[in-house]
């Protein structure tokens, strides 16, 4: 049967057919059933040992195209729809993006699930089935407002299973209900994303925006990802959430061990648990508790769990290394405290001279999650070469001295199926026409470098980019009502809003460029600066920065003398779907974090793969990008990580010195509270941004601002040598192969997980 015949049959069954007559929603449902049935025929990957990738987030994005590609039927489906007067991209708009993640670490988890299934490694993702995710972002009066991100009541792949586990808190036992999403590999087999929901969770308790009663645990537990932790009730809720996730996960893992006929003590032989950042860390004491309940002695239980768990560190920002007061844990999970105390006592006894630095429970009665992971996991990995080096030498040096054999690096990766084949079919086809399709499996683009001097190839590469830019411009015009010039330079910064990522530095550049244009110094070519970012609801300065950018957008786009030369567009509700639209159209990839602060970044890799040129600091994986492409194919600026670390150690940075000492910097910072902006925006919010620049600037924006402006000017000038620019873009693509998540997952497997690919089903 052809795809058209199959779809017709499915549509007839629903009384919605035939394909030419059916409306988009019916076609989407038919595609859902078609792919669902094809996926169900795939062998579930299994083996002697299985990986449980446990994470508070899985930023998986929409699944229709991904599944069609992985099933090898995307083209056929696109053609069948086309022939019947539909378009696949319009049908895709009907799918809700699952609200299960927030940023880089959640997207990483999603890429790793895709790669594990592609490499035929038995691996399930385990997490929570949030009703409303982080939040849906709306801009109202030039400010971010948060609303529930409703996604589960739309048709999709999520299914409810009959599996349930009890999870007990003092005076309250909740039921964890298991939901599943299929995870398809490219070709290959099938794994699952397994998500727990609280049976009693109840969205009707959400009032204004995303407000709800934080103490009503039974009803609020799985509504939102990272609920506001600015008060004690919110912090306690996070502990409840974390325990709910890990207790259900631990019960699932032990049940599968038992169902396979293995004794509890054999856990390390049959399971490996990758703890993605510290949110799931309580799985260590919880598993020990459950193994003891099965009759194991505490020492044996600790030993078994330590040989099963591995930890990935994602950040060196002190505020993100979770520490919970003993009080909270006594309140929410008292059954774990005796175990945590025992783990702490054993860790301290092993290195009494370091006790203060390595204690799980410190002198202020704070429980350090990462420390528990390091003492009682068998592997600790950073996510880029520089990040792992900083962990070893600075942040975790005492632990590295204690356990050198545990530390290893696994530079992050991205799946090329989603981030090239799906997001950028034009470039994908063009690359294939030059080097064949081997890259879809082996991630090798090196052969592209042979075309670096080939004028016809470079011109076609520019044409592909130009087409993508026109497509994005048309989409923005249609969906957002903003007009942008497809011939302008597309300069894009999309990532979570955080001071260390320094969107505020880009905003100061926008101010600089605005003032240049006002003074009659026009750029050679117009520039369109695109932003996308959500700010955590309680992160005041991040929300203020969004306000600043939206005010600049209002000011600049509304000024007819400036807007032909400069535009600012901040897209609303940045998510994977937006990333897939923006990245293929990008010229300049903004990766400007304060050196030493961005663990890796993965956005930088997606842009490189799509032929954008990086403007960045030597931070995270930018370091590896610059080594791969060579310094002539990347635009670097700013202080190096070593200098920054020294500045923090010596308290040697004072932003006021830069503000007072450089009239140009003073002029740009002052503009934040200028009459023009105050007229548009909220003086209170703008004043806070201004004050932070002058008095604090913890992430040292002003330190690198001058050089940023200089290098960006140089970059814009070099854009005018179109063939040279195309060559840089081509070299970037040619060396992007290292950042395939297939490479990363293969390394995790060889060096940490040691699973055998499963070929049983064939
Ligand atoms: C890749 C990705 C990120 C991570 O971006 P960074 O620039 O590495 O911080 C965040 N959000 C979404 C939607 C992404 O696709």
Image: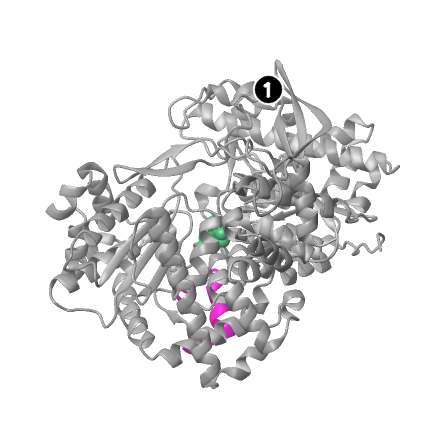
Q: Is residue 193 visible?
A: no
Q: Position of residue 147 (x, y in %)?
A: 41, 32
User: In the image shown, does 557 or 346 lie closer to the viewer?
Assistant: 557
Name the residue carrying label 1: 200
Q: Position of residue 372 (x, y in %)?
A: 61, 40
Q: Residue at x 70, y 53 (%)?
A: 117
510 up-or-down from 374: above or below: below
Q: Residue at x 47, y 19 (%)?
A: 205
Q: Is residue 148 left or right of residue 285?
A: left
Callout 1: 10 Å neighbours few (<14), some, many (20+)? Answer: some
454 up-or-down from 93: above or below: below
* Residue 620 part of the magenta-drawn span: yes
Q: Is residue 538 left or right of residue 553?
A: right
User: In the image shown, does 557 or 679 lie closer to the viewer?
Assistant: 557
Taking the view exactly as shown, the residue that stands out farthest to the top is 171
User: In the image shown, does 662 or 8 lie closer to the viewer?
Assistant: 8
The total number of labels drawn is: 1
Q: Is residue 539 visible?
A: yes
What's the magenta region? Answer: 614-632
User: In the image shown, does 334 or 712 lie closer to the viewer?
Assistant: 712
């Amino acid at each position: 049967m052809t795809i058209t015949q199959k779809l017709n049959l499915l549509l007839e069954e629903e009384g919605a057919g035939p394909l030419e007559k059916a409306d988009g929603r019916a076609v989407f449902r038919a595609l859902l059933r078609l792919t669902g049935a094809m996926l169900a025929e795939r062998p579930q990957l299994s083996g002697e040992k299985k990986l449980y990738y446990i994470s508070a987030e899985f930023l998986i994005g929409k699944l229709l195209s991904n599944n069609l590609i992985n099933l090898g039927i995307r083209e056929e489906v696109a053609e069948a729809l086309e022939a019947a007067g539909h378009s696949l991209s319009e049908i895709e708009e009907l799918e809700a993006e699952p609200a299960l993640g927030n940023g880089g670490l959640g997207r990483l988890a999603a890429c790793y699930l895709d790669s594990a299934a592609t490499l035929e490694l038995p691996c399930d993702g385990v997490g929570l089935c949030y009703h409303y995710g982080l939040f849906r972002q709306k801009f109202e009066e030039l400010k971010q407002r948060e609303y529930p991100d409703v996604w589960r009541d739309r048709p999709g792949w999520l299914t409810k299973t009959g599996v349930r586990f009890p999870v007990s808190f003092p005076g309250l036992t909740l039921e964890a209900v298991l939901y599943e999403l299929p995870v398809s590999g490219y070709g290959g087999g099938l794994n699952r994303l397994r998500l727990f929901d609280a049976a009693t969770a109840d969205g009707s308790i959400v009032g204004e925006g995303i407000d709800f009663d934080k103490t009503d645990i039974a009803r609020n537990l799985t509504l939102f990802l990272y609920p506001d932790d600015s008060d004690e009730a919110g912090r306690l809720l996070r502990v409840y959430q974390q325990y709910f996730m890990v207790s259900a996960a631990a019960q699932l893992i032990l049940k599968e061990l038992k169902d396979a006929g293995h004794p509890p003590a054999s856990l390390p032989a049959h399971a490996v648990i990758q703890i993605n950042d510290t949110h799931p860390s309580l799985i260590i004491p919880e598993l020990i508790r459950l193994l003891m309940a099965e009759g194991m002695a505490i020492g044996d239980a600790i030993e078994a769990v330590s040989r099963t768990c591995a930890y990935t560190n994602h950040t060196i920002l002190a505020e993100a290394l979770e520490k919970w007061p003993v009080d909270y844990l006594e309140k929410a999970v008292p059954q774990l405290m005796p175990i945590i105390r025992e783990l702490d006592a054993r860790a301290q006894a092993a290195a009494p001279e370091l006790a203060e630095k390595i204690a799980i429970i410190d002198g202020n009665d704070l429980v350090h999650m990462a420390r528990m992971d390091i003492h009682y996991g068998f592997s600790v990995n950073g996510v880029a070469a520089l990040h792992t080096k900083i962990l070893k030498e600075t942040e975790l040096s005492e632990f590295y001295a204690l356990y050198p054999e545990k530390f290893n690096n696994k530079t992050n990766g991205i799946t090329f199926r989603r981030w090239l084949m799906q997001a950028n079919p034009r470039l994908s086809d063009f690359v294939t026409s030059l080097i064949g399709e081997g890259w879809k499996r082996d991630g090798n683009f090196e052969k592209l470098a042979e075309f670096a001097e080939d004028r016809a190839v470079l011109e076609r590469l520019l044409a592909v980019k130009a087409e993508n830019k026109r497509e994005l411009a048309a989409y923005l015009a249609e969906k957002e009502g903003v007009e942008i010039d497809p011939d302008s330079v597309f300069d894009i910064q999309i990532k979570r809003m955080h001071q260390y990522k320094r969107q505020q530095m880009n905003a100061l550049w926008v101010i600089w460029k605005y003032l240049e244009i006002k003074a009659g110094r026009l750029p050679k070519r117009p520039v369109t600066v695109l932003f996308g970012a959500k700010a955590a609801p309680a992160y005041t300065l991040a929300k203020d920065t969004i306000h600043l950018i939206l005010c600049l957008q209002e000011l600049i786009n509304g000024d007819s003398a400036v807007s032909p030369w400069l535009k600012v567009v901040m897209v609303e509700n940045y998510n994977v779907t937006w990333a897939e639209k923006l990245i293929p159209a990008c010229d300049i990839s903004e990766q400007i974090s304060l050196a030493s602060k961005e663990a890796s970044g993965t956005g930088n890799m997606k842009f490189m793969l799509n032929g954008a040129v990086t403007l960045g600091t030597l931070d995270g994986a930018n370091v590896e990008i610059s080594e791969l492409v060579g310094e002539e194919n990347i635009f670097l600026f700013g202080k190096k990580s070593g200098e920054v670390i020294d500045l923090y150690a010596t308290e040697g940075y004072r932003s006021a010195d830069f503000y007072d000492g450089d009239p140009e910097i003073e002029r740009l910072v002052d503009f934040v509270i200028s009459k023009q902006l105050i007229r548009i925006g909220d003086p209170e919010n703008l004043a806070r941004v201004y004050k932070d620049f002058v008095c604090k600037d913890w992430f040292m924006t002003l330190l690198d601002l001058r050089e940023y402006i200089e290098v960006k000017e140089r970059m814009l000038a070099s854009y005018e040598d179109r063939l040279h620019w195309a060559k840089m873009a081509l070299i970037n693509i040619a060396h992007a192969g290292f950042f395939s998540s297939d490479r990363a997952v293969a390394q995790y497997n060889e060096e940490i997980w040691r699973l055998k690919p499963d070929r049983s089903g064939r």
